[in-house]
Image (cartoon, coloured by chain):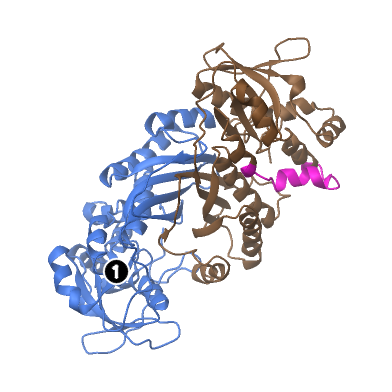
Chain colours: A brown, B blue
Amino acid sequence: MASEFEIIKKLRAVFPKIGDDAVEFKVSNIPIVSTDAFVMGEHFGDYFTPYDMGYKALSASISDIAACGGIPKYVLVSMGLSSGEMDFINELYRGMQEVANLYKVEIIGGDTTKSSTLFISVTVIGETKRFIGRNGARVGDAICVTGELGSSAAGLLALKNGLVGNRYICSLHLNPKPRVKEGIKIGKYASSMIDISDGLIIDLSHLLEESCVGAEIWKNKIPISKETIKIANKFSLSAQDFAMSGGEDFELLFTIPKDKLKEAQKKVDFTEIGEIIEPRTENRKPRIIDEEGNDIPVAGFDHFNRSPLLSKE
Amino acid sequence: MASEFEIIKKLRAVFPKIGDDAVEFKVSNIPIVSTDAFVMGEHFGDYFTPYDMGYKALSASISDIAACGGIPKYVLVSMGLSSGEMDFINELYRGMQEVANLYKVEIIGGDTTKSSTLFISVTVIGETKRFIGRNGARVGDAICVTGELGSSAAGLLALKNGLVGNRYICSLHLNPKPRVKEGIKIGKYASSMIDISDGLIIDLSHLLEESCVGAEIWKNKIPISKETIKIANKFSLSAQDFAMSGGEDFELLFTIPKDKLKEAQKKVDFTEIGEIIEPRTENRKPRIIDEEGNDIPVAGFDHFNRSPLLSKE
């Protein structure tokens, strides 16, 4: 097995600043920072290659910056590795570097240690001209999402069942693309924003709780791809459940004052799926309404107490 | 078991910004950042209470900022926990908060996930007026250290052997105090600096390699406490080996041009232990000289290939 210093030496050939004590960085505007941890078995299933692990860890972390309307700039990565095998580490870093190149972020530091459970902890430093938090939603605001929901959950189901032919949907689970460009544009209009990592219902609930408001979601307006519906049908499951509770889509969920909606829609593609209303209950769970105007009960996902809908990884 | 959201909710009572997507922060001067990962069994032995784990993780991370002559300002903590037990988490955070208070740093963000192996990843953001790296040592500079070396290794040995009566020496291993104040003062004079985390020899080797110089260390000048000598004697081991290869003292190791030495000594307590010389070999291992002027062979420590001297934790 390669020694820690050998590994760091090799890593530094690719990432010059791994292994330093601390590094300098520069930011203009408002500096922002976010940190995320990823664990083998918890966030990465067996069907993740080391490349996919690196890719997804960095993508998901960058999404947190996008969720504030920010521009990601710098990344620090600390890893716990169960072996010092350079092939594995090279692939892990190749996945990260791919994302770093795509989003023009620089990997400026990190740490490597031994751990029987593989983990990756990513810190992203970014900047923003206007920080969009979770607490600015107001009654009457439109609730909107970028892209389509439930694709990651559908991809996960395909991967778990060996349906690797469904490459596009699988890639959305393995190699998600955070909405940085969209976030910057939406940031000019949004009253609140969050990225969908735990699922529409759970992430919307966070936003409602912090904004002290309620929400009405029009179930039939939630954007879902044909591929997701195809996978759901194959397993006699509901694609709408995937969209509401699947998580890890890394689409942006945001609220926007109605008078700014049209202008925003000219700049970015997104879908209006509901409206902010007066809060109904203490826990601020959103109200989901079907075509007939009936309330629908929904489930969520939690790393400690898992959702019955999809047992992740 | 408490759910992830319950845990985050409780943590937020203590640390208001845990669980947010990203947070804003402010820095003046040159912003600097560092990240470190700590793993149960690798960095924390069985004799670590959760309080000690939190304390040491944050202390060791702050030390990286001190090593650049910086002032730590903000901390982000991501954790992989094997259980959602609030007693454990409260104690872990109490240790961190103690250090945060002591060094006036603010815990501004973090992430919590499930992991069969407990880990803590800490990112510290700081600032400095003058960034001191590892690459500025010049031939003729004095090599100096703060405090006493080998104490953490002696504390570790005491803890492993149940000698808990040696409280002071044990506390140096469990609850180290990074040299922030000293680092800021030394930063005005030093040509290069590093903190001693892997041991004097290894950390000095890093500094020599990056500065493209060699070193001569006067073995009998290395400061060692009486308590360390007492513990070493008890096990018929060499206290000087502890001092040279033990690691985790989090003292500062720095080089300083000779003409600035006297002025610096008026401001900070430290010990001159050697001199920067022309490089001798390719790997830039320092030359250790005993009282008779003879070279002494030494061992180091590495997380992947462990030192024969002390099998850590």
Nearest the viewer among A205 and B220 is: A205
Q: Is residue A139 above or below residue B34?
A: above
Nearest the viewer among B116 and B23 is: B23
Q: Is residue A308 visible?
A: no
Q: Is residue A71 above or below residue A256?
A: below
According to the picture, the residue beneath numbered tag 1 turns out to be B253
Residue positioned most to the left: B266
Q: Is residue B239 visible?
A: yes
Residue A156: in magenta span: no
Residue A176: in magenta span: yes
* Residue that appears at 79% across and 42% down: A169
Chain ID at mark 1 = B
Q: Residue A41 appears at what percent x and percent y?
A: 64, 45
Q: Label 1 amino acid? A: Leu
Q: Residue A287 appears at what percent x and percent y?
A: 65, 15
Quadrant of the rendered image containing residue B154: bottom left
Q: Residue B104 appears at what percent x and percent y?
A: 28, 44
Nearest the viewer among A74 and A84 is: A74
* Residue that appears at 56% across and 41% down: A64
Instruction: Locate the N terminus of chain A and report the quarter of the image it occupies.
Output: bottom right
* 10 Å crowding of disc 1: few (<14), some (14-19), many (20+): many
Instruction: Locate the C terminus of chain A and report the quarter of the image it occupies.
Output: top right
Q: Is residue B24 above or below residue B8?
A: below
Nearest the viewer among A277 and A112 is: A277
| Tag count | 1
Quadrant of the rendered image containing residue A49: bottom right
Q: Residue A250 appears at what percent x and percent y?
A: 65, 39
Query: Bounds of the magenta span?
Result: A159-181
